[in-house]
Image (cartoon, helix red, strand yellow):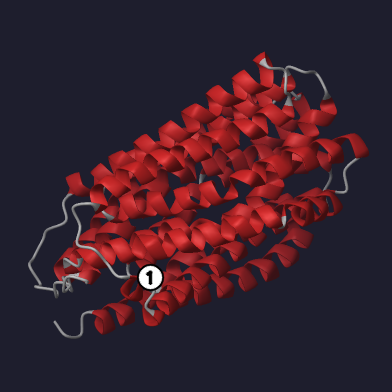
């Protein structure tokens, strides 16, 4: 039997700077640890002195980005729905939301495992690499995909904890999975001399161990929560809502990934030097974006809780404070990158011509963080409130404008045109969501 869910009692709660930072800082740190894994894996494989192995690792990582990025909805969608249940005081629904996400993650992960030969074959065809590189990539992909069910379930676990506002626990789990990944990759890759296979198996082991640890914490918590029937958990209306939300977020993620891939492709048309310089500068941009993702995560939880409680003052406070912190940090980050960007570029590449080319376009990358801050924060707001259709539609509109500007400005201004198109894309995403928000707020809080 399901204990009757509590209805919203509209108890006021005030969003404070402390609440925002308690979520944003741990999540920013958690996101910042992720690129470290790629550096360690590259260092481990690089010790073997085989260019083909490094090429296989790099191309395999690109394939995984393409395959796994669309499934970020398992984290963000779960966060928004759990946060809304927290706002309503509906504890059974928090539990049911997690099990729905868990089921989707497990099924999707198993399908990836079954389709791993096809995914590897498509990856080899798309990358069109030399045979030694293709062989290394095939081995890496097939092994890594074994971890797909555990990896996707970990997305759902992190989404649940973040929805509950337990960002510190989310940080611990991220540090745990990344730390064990590093340890296993070094031991299996170097000490057991498994090479690229050891790096792949290291990821598999770390994802499985992290899943077991996360589920142990959840099961312990769920013992103190009223039991929820299968009928309630897999209620068709609730499942449809989650599928629609997740589908919209997936489309948004695919469009975002497509924009970055198209930007890279057009840069390649301008020559290898421009391609290499843009790759370095995009790393600079993404490093700044990781900080902003922490405040987007704070917006997801606090806005979701406010919408669930039908608490408009709390909603306004969450939007205002996460925006203030995100804009402040983005401005600081942009200035630091602009002032010290040349040193950052020098640390990433020793090729003098690539350094010189990257420095030429450094201002574009440095201030891209400021252009993208509103989009990042608004995404957090809309995901927390489950206004996914608007987020999907504005993303597709922004992507269409980006494509038009990219090709026209790229022809007229070269790489400066490509970077200006990226800024237009980032600004349009944020401004369009900001313009839509007042109408959605009036609808969501109409009964207040």
Q: Residue 10: x and y, percent?
A: 10, 72
Q: Nearer the viewer, residue 391 or 366?
A: 391
* Quarter the N terminus occupies: bottom left
Q: Quadrant of residue 109?
A: bottom right
Compared across the picture, whether 370 is left or right of 193 comes to: left
Q: Residue furthest front?
A: 1
**Is 85 located above or below residue 442 in the figure?**
above
Compared across the picture, whether 211 is left or right of 54 comes to: left
Q: Residue 443: x and y, percent?
A: 27, 84
Callout 1: SS: helix
Q: Which residue is mark 1?
A: 434
Q: Residue 197: x and y, percent?
A: 72, 30
Compared across the picture, whether 314 is left or right of 351 comes to: left
Crowding at dot 1, Cα within 10 Å, few <14 / some 14-19 / many 20+, comes out as some
* Quarter the C terminus occupies: bottom left
Residue beneath the point at 70% across and 63% down: 406
């Amino acid at each position: 039997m399901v204990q009757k869910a509590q209805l919203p009692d509209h108890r006021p709660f005030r969003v404070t700077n402390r609440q925002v930072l308690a979520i944003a800082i741990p999540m920013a740190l958690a996101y910042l640890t992720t690129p470290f894994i790629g550096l360690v894996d590259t260092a481990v494989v690089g010790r073997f002195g085989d260019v083909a192995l490094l090429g296989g690792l790099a191309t395999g990582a690109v394939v995984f980005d393409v395959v796994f990025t669309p499934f970020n909805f398992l984290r963000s969608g779960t966060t928004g729905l759990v946060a809304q249940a927290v706002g309503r005081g509906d504890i059974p629904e928090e539990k049911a939301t997690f099990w729905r996400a868990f089921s989707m993650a497990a099924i999707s992960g198993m399908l990836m495992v079954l389709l791993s030969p096809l995914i590897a074959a498509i990856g080899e065809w798309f990358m069109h690499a030399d045979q030694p590189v293709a062989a290394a990539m095939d081995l890496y992909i097939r092994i890594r995909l074994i971890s797909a069910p555990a990896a996707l379930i970990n997305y759902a676990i992190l989404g649940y904890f973040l929805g509950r506002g337990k960002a510190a626990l989310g940080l611990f789990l991220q540090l745990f999975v990344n730390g064990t990944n590093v340890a296993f990759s070094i031991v299996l890759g170097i000490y057991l001399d498994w090479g690229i296979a050891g790096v792949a198996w290291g990821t598999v082991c770390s994802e499985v161990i992290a899943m077991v640890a996360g589920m142990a914490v959840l099961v312990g918590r769920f013992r103190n929560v009223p039991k929820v029937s299968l009928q309630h958990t897999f209620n068709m209306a609730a499942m449809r809502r989650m599928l629609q939300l997740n589908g919209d977020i997936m489309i948004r993620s695919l469009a975002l990934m497509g924009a970055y891939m198209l930007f890279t492709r057009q840069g390649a048309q301008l020559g290898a030097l421009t391609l290499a310089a843009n790759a370095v500068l995009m790393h600079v941009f993404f490093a700044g974006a990781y900080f902003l993702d922490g405040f987007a995560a704070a917006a997801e939880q606090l806005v979701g809780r406010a919408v669930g409680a039908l608490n408009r003052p709390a909603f306004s406070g969450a939007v205002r404070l996460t925006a203030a912190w995100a804009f402040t940090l983005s401005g600081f980050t942009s200035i630091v990158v602009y002032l010290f960007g040349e040193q950052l570029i020098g640390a990433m590449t020793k090729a003098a011509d690539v350094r010189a080319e990257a420095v030429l376009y450094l201002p574009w990358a440095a201030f891209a963080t400021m252009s993208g801050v509103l989009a990042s924060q608004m995404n957090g707001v809309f995901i927390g409130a489950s206004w996914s259709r608007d987020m999907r539609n504005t993303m597709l509109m922004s992507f269409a404008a980006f494509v038009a500007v990219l090709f026209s400005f790229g022809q007229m201004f070269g790489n400066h045109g490509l970077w200006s198109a990226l800024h237009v894309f980032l600004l349009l995403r944020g401004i369009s969501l900001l313009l839509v928000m007042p109408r959605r707020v009036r609808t969501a809080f109409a009964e207040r």
